[in-house]
Amino acid sequence: VQLQASGGGLVQSGGSLRLSCAASGATLDTYAITWFRQAPGKEREGVSCISASGGTTYYKDSVKGRFTMSRDNAKKTVYLQMINLKPEDTAVYHCAGQVGSYYTLVREWYAYWGQGTQVTVSS
């Protein structure tokens, strides 16, 4: 499967963005998907993940209540709705996938990675 992230941009603090992760080359319904982000000079970190069925999601504490992950397997797309964005959310956001029911924020688990999309939040 190939993954492509999009939807990033420049917003002011408190603003919103919706990121999309579009899949090609395979159906998406057997893949757990996670969003990662990497800020300059920092390690890549897991932000949120969703099970293959979409029935379960998990979020990093710092984004709980502000980020919502969803998926439309028919459209082969996973979304990350981000509201109340903060300057510390500024990073390149990547989506990653792995076949199976297990999902985690640990980046080493994921075999399939998309190109990132830049999110910049100004104060």
Image (tube, rainbow, N blue to C red):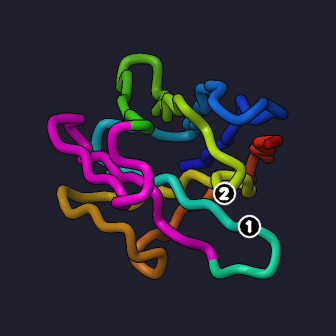
Count of picture labels: 2
Q: Residue at x 46, y 33 (%)?
A: 78
In the rendered image, residue 72, in percent from the top left (x then y), is placed at 37, 22
119 vs 2, nearest the viewer: 119
Pointer 2 residue: 88
Q: Quadrant of residue 86?
A: top right
**How many C-alpha atoms fall within 10 Å of the one at disc 1: few (<14), some, or many (≥20)?**
some
Element under disc 1:
loop
Q: Residue at x 46, y 27 (%)?
A: 76
**Mark 2 and mark 1: span between their CA atoms?**
9 Å
Is-magenta flag for residue 101? Answer: no
Is-magenta flag for residue 55? Answer: yes
Determine whether, in the image, residue 81 is placed left or right of residue 105.
right
Identity, as a three-letter code, of the amino acid under mark 2 = Glu
Q: Nearer the viewer, mark 2 or mark 1?
A: 2
Marks 2/1 in contact by CB < 8 Å: the verdict is yes
4 vs 66, nearest the viewer: 66
Pointer 1 residue: 39
Q: Residue at x 73, y 53 (%)?
A: 90
Determine whether, in the image, residue 77 is placed left or right of residue 56.
right
Identity, as a three-letter code, of the amino acid under mark 1 = Ala
State the extent of the magenta-drawn residues as a range. Answer: 44-65
Determine whether, in the image, residue 97 is placed left or right of residue 10.
left
